[in-house]
Image (cartoon, rainbow, N blue to C red):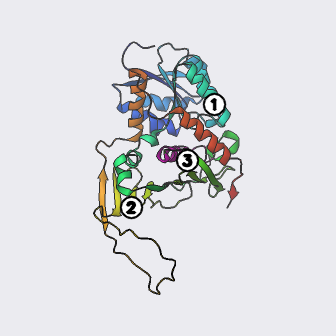
């Protein structure tokens, strides 16, 4: 282990997730993290990382990299099919491990990782930057729920237009939107529901992806209290105009766009009171009864907006160095694997 407060990081897998997500965040937090090793079969990809981190040691095999006693933490951003084995290899060496979702391709695999992590002192963290995003932090605030009344519906939307032709479009390599695009939106929904779902409906479609795996996933979850979450992860959206997160309550709604640090309320004026009376069993009048509803619109501003990946890695630092509990309970990630496993039991519908 390194003796400084700086965390020494080894990265296995140098694809887009690492290059355009995690590594820029680690570079911006150079007082907290130091990228010292990189592991990938492709030399060109290792060299791409070395452009920004010229002092990294290069490895082709994970087993060789985790032999380095100066590595405090390993970031796993390999293809999904390798996540479970790579995470187990790191945990068996007692190394802090951050693994991209899905941490495993099955619920059983996620349970195995949970057990291995507990054995090593809870050293496995799922990479969940979307749960540290500005829009999710806004939607999670208790004052938001208070203003919209009793929550009854959550809508989460993630969309782009991407005709994938890489391994993420192939079922054989663990690809498909359920394993990449839907992971964090479902985690967001499970967190916002604040109660375990008792019912679920789902469907998958293959619309524009060039492989055989789905690029559209839709789930609906319902708690025993009747709160629903409607989640859509769609790679066939030409233009995304819907809010990333919408909360609906008995007195109004709250919505926030992807990446925004400002959300919008549209609620019944807090000063308005409705008269309390019972419905009549008599025939209704021919004219539709109306009530004068006074609407109130406002915005909610996030006090300390921050890029999602940077916020995620700051939380990792607090957990590894200062022994603070990580904000995302790994048991929630295990439950995610269970729900996604159910979704994937039905083959996608080809359009």
Which callout, 1 or 2, points at the residue further toward the start of the chain?
1
Please identify the quarter of the rendering in which residue 30 is found.
top left
- Magenta segment: 176-193
Q: Is residue 268 visible?
A: yes
Q: Is residue 102 visible?
A: no
Residue at the disc numbered 3: 181
* 215 relative to 36, above or below: below
Distance between mark 2 and mark 3 Cα atoms: 32 Å
* Disc ID at residue 337: none
State the residue at coordinates (38%, 36%). 311
Nearest-to-viewer mark from 1 and 3: 1
Predominant secondary structure in magenta? Answer: helix
State the residue at coordinates (57%, 28%). 40
Is residue 122 a member of the stretch shown in magenta?
no
Task: Give how far across and how far down residue 208 sits, in percent.
Answer: 62, 57
Check the image and name the residue furthest to the bottom.
286
Q: Are marks 2 and 3 in contact (CB under 8 Å)?
A: no
* 217 relative to 36, above or below: below
Which callout, 2 or 3, points at the residue further toward the start of the chain?
3
């Amino acid at each position: 282990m390194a003796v400084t407060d700086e965390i020494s990081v080894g990265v296995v897998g140098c694809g887009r997730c690492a290059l355009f997500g995690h590594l820029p965040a680690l570079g911006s937090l150079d007082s907290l993290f130091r990228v010292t090793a990189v592991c990938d079969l492709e030399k060109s990809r290792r060299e791409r990382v070395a452009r920004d981190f010229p002092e990294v040691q290069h490895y082709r095999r994970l087993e060789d990299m985790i032999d380095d006693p100066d590595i405090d933490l390993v970031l796993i951003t390999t293809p999904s099919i390798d996540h479970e084995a790579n995470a187990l290899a790191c945990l068996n060496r007692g190394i802090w491990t951050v693994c991209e979702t899905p941490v495993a391709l099955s619920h059983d695999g996620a349970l195995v990782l949970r057990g291995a992590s507990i054995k090593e002192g809870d050293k496995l963290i799922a990479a969940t930057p979307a749960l540290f995003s500005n829009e999710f932090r806004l939607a999670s605030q208790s004052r938001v729920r208070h203003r919209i009344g009793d929550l009854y519906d959550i809508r989460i939307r993630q969309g782009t237009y991407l005709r994938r032709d890489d391994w993420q479009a192939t079922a054989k390599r663990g690809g498909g939107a359920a394993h990449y695009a839907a992971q964090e939106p479902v985690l967001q929904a499970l967190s916002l529901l604040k109660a375990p779902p008792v019912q679920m409906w789902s469907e998958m479609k293959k619309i524009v992806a060039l492989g055989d795996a789905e690029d559209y996933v839709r789930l609906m979850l319902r708690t025993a209290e009747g709160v629903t979450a409607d989640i859509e992860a769609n790679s066939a959206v030409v233009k995304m105009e819907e809010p990333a997160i919408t909360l609906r309550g008995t007195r109004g709604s709250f919505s926030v766009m992807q990446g925004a640090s400002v959300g919008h309320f549209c609620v019944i004026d807090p000063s308005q009171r409705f008269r309390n009376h019972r419905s009549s069993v008599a025939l209704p009048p021919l004219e539709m009864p109306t009530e004068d509803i006074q609407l109130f619109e406002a915005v909610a501003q996030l006090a300390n907006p921050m890029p999602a990946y940077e916020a995620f890695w700051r939380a990792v630092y607090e957990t590894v160095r200062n022994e603070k509990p990580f904000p995302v309970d790994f048991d929630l990630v295990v439950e995610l694997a269970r729900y996604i496993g159910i979704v994937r039991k039905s083959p996608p519908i080809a359009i």
